[in-house]
Image: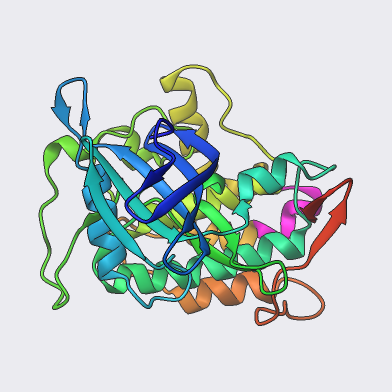
Amino acid sequence: MAEFDTVKSYRFIEELGSGAFGQVFRVEDLRDNKICALKVVEEVKDGIEDVSGKQEVRFLKALKGVAGIPDLLDSFSMEKKLCIITPLLLSDLGHFLRHNPNRRFTPKTVARIGNDLITILKSVHSHGIVHRDIKPDNLLLGETLQNARLFLSDFGMAFRYSTAGGVKIRAPRLSYSFEQPVHTTPVMMVENKATPLDDVVMSLYTLVFISGLFPFNEPTWTGRYFQKSDFMDSPETILVGENSWLVPFAEKVCGYEKEEIVDYEELCVLLTNSFDAPIDTNSPYELTPLNGRFVLY
């Protein structure tokens, strides 16, 4: 939609990024002059309807008011493109990681992110929704520098696995396939239906990645599958030295059976009580100015 200066009441300012699920722009809402994020998703790809944008809108509506989920401000279709308007957040953890001089966050920052992510997932799962795409690029800080909190975004791959009353819902077979991405679980790689536990396992992988470790680096599907399976069996072989604090959390996550109910509170305690003093989970994240940008350590 870069060819348009204005769409509906939104004036385009600049493109912020793009990926498999669309482009994101900084826009101004001309009705109140507020700056927002506008995500553009193609409704048809290669002649086939793409429902990921509609799914994202549906789940953002279902999760309205949940802490750590961006508010859906508006959505509309134009020129076979779906536009999704949300508050403009600062940036994603992948961005902060790339601009961190150490290419990793400190253990206490990792623990804080883990606590906040598990807390968000507890709320998401209580609504019967599995995200299925947990990774640093889908975790953002916002809404301001002075009040930076963690947000989980990009629900285009999510699905509803149960009703509000707890009745299980069967996922369409075509939505099972997640063989290639580095951040997906062994269960998902063999095209089995994801469960809330898979979100939690992907959260563990995310904490490993932002700690500066990349243990799933084999170029082939088979190699990555066995690397992940080995990690699930013995996470302590990867989490050594300054990352050994993460072992109790990892062992708990890796020890769950597929249909076992996740104890979110216990997981948070394992993360926040891993140091001499408990992690402060109430204060905003501290962003430090460095060379003209803000850095998360």
Residue 223 falls left or right of residue 148: left
Residue 204, position as x, y percentages in the image: 54, 53
**Whether residue 88 can be seen here:** yes
Splitting the image into 4 quarters, where does residue 161 fall?
Answer: bottom left
Is 172 covered by the magenta stretch? no
Residue 176 falls left or right of residue 201: left
How many numbered discs? Answer: 0
**Whether residue 195 can be seen here:** no
Is 243 covered by the magenta stretch? yes
Splitting the image into 4 quarters, where does residue 260 fall?
Answer: bottom left
Point out the image quarter for the N terminus: top left
Residue in the image at 19% along x and 42% along y: 51
Q: How is the image coloured?
A: rainbow
Q: Going by the picture, which residue comes out furthest to the right?
A: 291
Residue in the image at 46% along x and 76% along y: 67
Residue 291, position as x, y percentages in the image: 89, 45
Q: Please, what is the dominant secondary structure of the magenta stretch?
A: helix
Work out whether residue 57 or residue 40 is closer to the camera in this orientation and state it.
40
Residue in the image at 45% along x and 33% along y: 19
Residue 85 falls left or right of residue 103: left
Work out whether residue 37 or residue 121 is closer to the camera in this orientation and state it.
37
Residue 145, position as x, y percentages in the image: 71, 66
Residues in magenta? 239-246
Residue 291 falls left or right of residue 25: right
Work out whether residue 199 or residue 144 is closer to the camera in this orientation and state it.
144
- Residue 219, compared with residue 160, is above or below; it is above
Point out the image quarter for the C terminus: bottom right
Residue 237, position as x, y percentages in the image: 66, 42
